[in-house]
Image (cartoon, helix red, strand yellow):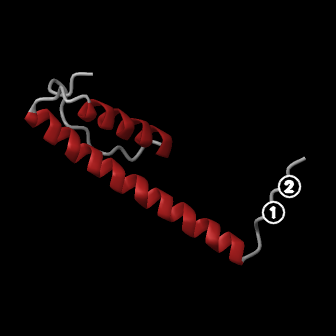
Amino acid sequence: MSASKKSPTTVNDQQTFAERLTALESIVKSMESGELPLEAALTAYTEGMQLLQVCQESLQQAEQTVMILNQQQQLAPFEAN
């Protein structure tokens, strides 16, 4: 992946949480490699922060949904067979 040749990716509303997380992991790996030029690293950092924010928001929404369902007693306890 050559971050210096690709344009900055904006967060895509059509991406799933898993796709966003995979993209974030890819950015982290490329930045940890230490092989990105400064401009590409800054671009990757910005994109990563956007993805992180959207992932955190998704997790907060999921947590709120679970809390609401628990309060409404719509969730059944998990029973392993």
| 43 or 69, nearer to the observer | 43
Is the Cβ of the residue at disc 1 closer than 8 Å to that at disc 2? yes
| 9 or 25, nearer to the observer | 25
State the CA–CA distance, disc 1 to disc 2: 6 Å
Residue on which disc 1 sits: 77
> Of all residues shown, which one is farthest toward the right?
81
Determine which of the numbered discs, if any, sits on residue 79 in the image: 2
| 77 or 71, nearer to the observer | 77
Figure check: 23 above or below 78:
above
- Where is residue 16 shown, x and y percent of the image? 48, 43
Determine which of the numbered discs, if any, sits on residue 4 in the image: none
Residue type at mark 1: give it. Answer: Pro
Give the side of residue 77 with respect to residue 69, left or right: right
- Where is residue 62 shown, x and y percent of the image? 55, 61
* Residue at image point 36% right, 40% down: 24
> Of all residues shown, which one is farthest toward the bottom?
71
Give the side of residue 71 with respect to residue 26, left or right: right
Q: Element at badge 2? A: loop
